[in-house]
Image (cartoon, rainbow, N blue to C red):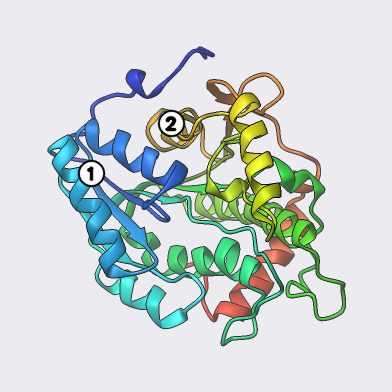
Amino acid sequence: MTSTWTAAHMPRLDGRSIVVTGGTRGIGLATARAAAASGARVVITGRSDESAADVAATVAADTGAQVVGRGLDLTDRDSILRFADGLDDVDVLLHNAGIIPAAPEYTADGFESGMATNLLGPFLLTNTVLPRVRDRVVVVTSLVHRLGVVDPADLHFARRRWSQKRAYADSKLANAQWALELDRRLREAGSRTAAVLCHPGVAATEITSLTPLQAVNDGVIWAAARVANTAERAADCELYAATMPVPPGAFVGPRGRGIRGAPTLVGRSQAASDLRAAGLLWEAAAAQTRSEFPL
């Protein structure tokens, strides 16, 4: 596998359809734009129908592709089910949307906002539309998943002390374990749909704004711009995972130390490889979202 791959090496995607959640800015927007430029029909989701439609119209005008924008709130069950109900068959469901929660906030269902957005919303959406996904589900995690600890009995910090770092790392490890169990279930069911995990390394995007202090955020972004991937380079990892012939269950990330660079297959951490833990997480997520594997 080459370590110099970029979106310029991506095959034409004419006739294929890709859903990119969180596609209105940052890495998601770069991913959606590159997929559209290669001929894919792209569905971009954003926080509202209006914002998603505006971005989709711009990408469509720039690329000449069919691009649709739809609102999707991954913390809202009704929003997820409405989005799923209006979704046609797709080739790739790419879970790019994610947050680093600034404070301990909870959804109407009592879910911690980071776990709701990064895991439980995508889990429900995937289970709902999986029979309509022809090729693969791509789950985006982060390098910080290596710092996470997933407790299926306490996903929402009822007994543990919440911190921003812990909440984000835990949700990203949960992403990795979910993708592991999804891949196992797909294989067991004999499905031709694959589950692929990826991480974009460290990217200089707005998600780098980790604190409520703008001066600190400006410093973080300044540093990230000098050592991290651009949004377009980070999007290469998502595009590689979404379009190239990688094995089911593969993990794609930047080469080298994983901070920046061209996409390649990378190894999983021990926690991200734990099938028993992944199964327990699945059971908790299924109970909390009232959804199950549909195949």
Q: Looking at the picture, how far across and down is residue 254, in whole percent? A: 59, 26
Work out whether residue 295 can be spotted.
no
- Residue 155 vertical position relative to residue 197 in the rendered view, above or below: below
Compared with 154, 45 (above or below) is above
Q: SS at mark 2?
A: helix
Question: Which quadrant of the figure contains the C terminus?
Answer: bottom left
What residue does disc 1 label? 59
> Of the residues under marks 2 and 1, which one precedes in the sequence?
1
Labels in figure, total: 2
Q: What residue do we see at 81% from left, 81% from top?
A: 158
Closer to us: 202 or 294: 202
- Left or right? Give the position of 141 relative to 55: right
Provide the secondary structure element on which disc 1 rests. helix
The answer to whether residue 132 of the structure is visible from this angle is: yes
Q: Amino acid at mark 1?
A: Val
Q: Which residue is mark 2?
A: 232
Residue 16 horizontal side relative to residue 72, left or right:
left
* Residue at x 67% of width, y 75% of height: 112
Taking the spot 28% from the left edge, 74% from the top edge, the residue there is 85
Where residue 222 appears, as percent x and y from the top left, is 62, 34
Residue 170 occupies quadrant: bottom right
Label 1 Cα neighbours within 10 Å, binned few <14 / some 14-19 / many ≥20: many
Q: Quick one: label 2, few (<14), some, or many (20+) residues within 10 Å?
A: some
Q: 255 or 133: nearer the eye?
A: 255
Is 99 placed left or right of 60 in the picture?
Answer: right
Which label was assigned to residue 290? none
Residue at 59% in and 86% down: 109
Q: Position of residue 288 (x, y in %)?
A: 62, 80
Measure how far apart labels 2 and 1 are at the Cα level.
Answer: 14 Å
Q: Amino acid at mark 2?
A: Glu
Front-most of 52 and 94?
52
Q: Is residue 147 above or below residue 278?
A: above
